[in-house]
Image (cartoon, grey):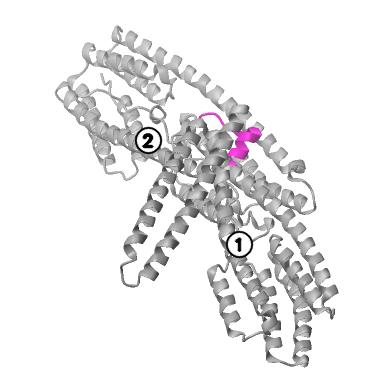
Amino acid sequence: MNSNLPVPEEQFGTPAEDVRPVTPAATAENDATPSATDDNRMDFADEEAALAADSAGLELDEATPEEVESSAGETSEEERTLTGKSRGELIAWFEKRMEEQPIQTLRREAEALKIAFYKQHRADVEAQRRAFVEAGGSEEEFAPATDEWENRLKELFREYRRRRDEFIASLEEVKQANLQVKLRIIEELKELVDSDETLNHTFTKFRELQQRWKETGIVPQQHMKDIWETYNLHVENFYNFIKINKELRDLDLKKNYEQKTALCEAAEALVEEPSIVEAFHKLQKLHDEWRETGPVANEYKETVWERFKEASSRINRRHQEHFENLKQEQLKNLELKNGLCEQTEELVSQPLTTRKEWNRASDRLLEIQKVWKTIGFAPKKDNTRIYERFRNACDRFFEAKRAFYTSMKDEMEHNLQLKNELCEAAEALQESEEWKKTTDELISLQTQWKEIGAVSRRHADAVWKRFRAACDRFFERKEQHFKEMGGEQEQNLARKLELLAEMAAAEVREGGYETIREFQRRWSEIGFVPIKRKEEIQKRYKQTVDALFAQLRGSERDRSMNRFREKVSSLREAGSKRLHSERERLYGKVRQLEQEIALLENNIGFFSNSKNAEALVAGVRDKIRKAREEMAATVEKVKMIDRENDKTAQQ
């Protein structure tokens, strides 16, 4: 008897559908307003809709073999157009299908209906949320309106599950009844062997039992093999122990041989079937036919069975290899997705403090989401876990970004109020004729302006033009006044004072050294000033230039220290070992810089005898200055870590 029959597909495990995350994506790079932070989003709508449907209680149990077989075909054109239907049309469509089709054929359509419906449902809830927030409501207080269509869908699914449960229950009853029928047929076969009736009547009865066996449906899976082997045993007993007409027997055996040879050819042809899964399903049907076909002559029995078994084994191996390869690919996909989760979580942990840093990080996250979309399914047991991990990391990133832009918006609104007040003060002075006093006051206002942070881009240009116009109005009047007084030097003095005021108000963080050099060039192009003011004006110019350089260096150093302060906080949360390791690294860097400074100072003595010694020495001194600044910053970082360690010890 055969012990190597095809294994039903559900024993191998069909690959699970992947669940993919949907999260808000990065904002446009140059947009400074919080309202733009969620414009670009990756499309994980199908996965999110499936999760939403399952969360709403519409998840289905494992598919029965009858449902698996009915879902093996191609997706119908009508199913492919579900996304174009409204929620009411989707429900009406499925109601009609439930009326027209057997309940066991509707599982794939039920799954497609859930996804199409909840894609629309989720989009509607998101629209309600946006409208609620735009109207001034808090996102935490938002509650979606009751969706009557969703309630109707749940009622429809309850009816669908009820009918499906009835079908499964009735199917089990039918299988049990079929089992009893086939057991009775086997008993009748036993009695037939011992019957004393005439040969013709016995053979006719045997044919009748064979036909009844074929017409009887399937039995429970756990009894299928045993009952077929028992039946086949008694069929062979009939041929072995009933003395029938040899010609009639040979004719029957020949017919069975022809049928089994055709089954062998059909099985061998399945090896070329492009769809491995489809070939496996067809092979199971061929095995059902083989079981229902009677015995062949003894000289062919082993040969024809080996031929059929060989073809079956090749298809089974292909089927097994297909799912083994699929399993390996899914494990590789899981590894890739774990890597993307780690990259996203690293982005979340970074201390981002500027719009530029947030935009850069948002672009990086968008690229990670695009890569996620290109990766195939992970193993079923890991799908939800890895998706939830990725989605949670994305959510944490965008929640932090939203909080950053909210705080920045409040700060920029406060800065706008302060700058408007400075505009009002400058406008109050623009018609003054107290030239010296007003000049000093305007320079003071410009210094205050420089110390105030940024405002939103929507207002930045207008408020700056307003302030600049008031200052320009005064200095133009002042320049005209001194022109009328005559004297080129007085005009030069006025121009230099105006340039000093412009330099005092300048923001050099973005323009950098080029901005300072441009101021120096413009200063050198202005001629002499009155001798009594020369020393004073030159001193003020030097102080202003030094302040610009200090501002540029200070802003860079402050940004560096702020970023490091955030890094220290993250390291402290990660554990004292990480913090200690960072301190050791920095302390090593201090020792290295000390050695470099000592070497450079020693080299100055060698350069004194070289040609162009002055230029070489100046270059070395500049390197020493930069190294000392870097060492001072590094020492400050070490002290910052020590302060954090002291706080931890006190706690």
Magenta region: which residues?
49-62
Secondary structure of the magenta portion, mostly? Answer: helix
Residue 320 falls in which quadrant of the image? top left
Near mark 1 (Cα within 10 A), the count class, few <14, some 14-19 or many ≥20, is some
Residue where numbered disc 2 is placed: 327
The kind of residue tagged 1 is Gln
SS class of the residue under badge 2?
helix
Residue at 56% of width from left, 60% of height from top?
Answer: 553
**Going by the image, does 587 lie left or right of 463?**
left
Q: Is residue 614 magenta?
A: no
Figure check: 133 above or below 17: below
Query: Which quadrant holds residue 453?
Result: bottom right
Image quadrant in which the C terminus is located: top right
Specify whether residue 184 is in view. Answer: yes
User: How many numbered discs?
Assistant: 2
Residue 177's spot in the image, x, y percent? 49, 17
Mark 2 residue type? Lys
Give the residue number, with chain letter if any, for mark 1: 551
Q: Looking at the image, which residue is at 64% across and 67% down? A: 507
For image coordinates 74% across by 49% down, the residue present is 128
Q: Residues within 10 Å of mark 2 (few under 14, many from 20)?
A: some
In the image, is 124 to the left or to the right of 60? right
Ranked by sequence position, the earlier of labels 1 and 2 is: 2
Between 62 and 518, the one nearer to me in the picture: 518
Vertical position of residue 362 compared to residue 321: above or below: below
